[in-house]
Amino acid sequence: MHVFFSAEFTFGGRLRNYIEKGTLTGQPRAAALHKPDAMEDIYLEIYDVLLFRAASITGNSDDAKDIVQDLYLRLKAQETRQLPLANPRGYLYGMVSNMAKMFLRNEIRHRELEQQLASTSVVEPRTNYIDDLLAPLSQLQRVVVGLHDIEGYTCVEIAIRLSKSPSAVRKQLSLAHRRLREKNNSKNHE
């Protein structure tokens, strides 16, 4: 669901008030810079502006709220190292803009990847190679080769599973191996 915001409607004109008063671009009070939670205070002060900016880039209010929340978590993680900023409001505004743009890029990449995965065929080329290789064999020979050579069953175990005699299984396995060798030799001579 995409929701576009109107500054007048959504925030009761508060965005216009921020811009008219110069709060968004204004310099912070000197006392505010010395407080340990000064960035959090500024974040809360311009929360609506940050939310509007993120929503205007993403076009979705839910994604915008997530981005602004992520910004807050980043601020809390950086709280231990105090960055001397000339314009903390501009810093937060730029951060939320960059985070929203990065979110959009990731969404586009994710959609493209999903489309690529949906358009690729499910059958792998290796499967076609095996099918071509086993084409000259009878159905019984394919089963015997699969159980013996791939699954690792002995001829006696295969005979029990297929209700055949062990000598019949050995004969089918021998014929299958001979046909596979002949096919391989004929491909090598071409």
Image (cartoon, rainbow, N blue to C red):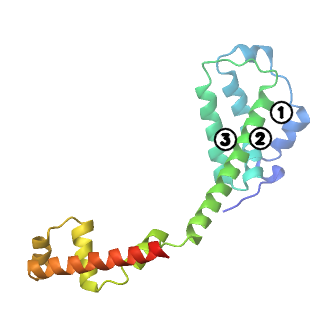
Tell me what residue is drawn at x 77 percent, y 41 percent.
49
Foreground mark, 1 or 3? 3
The foreground one among 103 and 52 is: 103
Please name the residue that numbered disc 1 is placed on. Answer: 24
Looking at the rendered structure, the secondary structure element under dot 2 is helix
N-terminal of the pair, mark 2 or mark 3, is 2
Foreground mark, 2 or 3? 3
Please name the residue that numbered disc 3 is placed on. Answer: 68
Q: Which amino acid does label 3 sit on?
A: Val
Tell me what residue is drawn at x 72 percent, y 39 percent.
96
Q: What residue type is labelled 2?
A: Val
Q: Distance between the residues labelled 1 and 2?
A: 8 Å
Instruction: Give how far across and how far down residue 125 sits, in percent.
Output: 49, 70
Looking at the rendered structure, the secondary structure element under dot 1 is loop
Q: Which amino acid does label 1 sit on?
A: Leu
Instruction: Give how far across and how far down residue 93 sits, in percent.
Output: 77, 36
N-terminal of the pair, mark 1 or mark 2, is 1
Q: Which of the 4 quarters of the picture holds residue 184?
A: bottom left
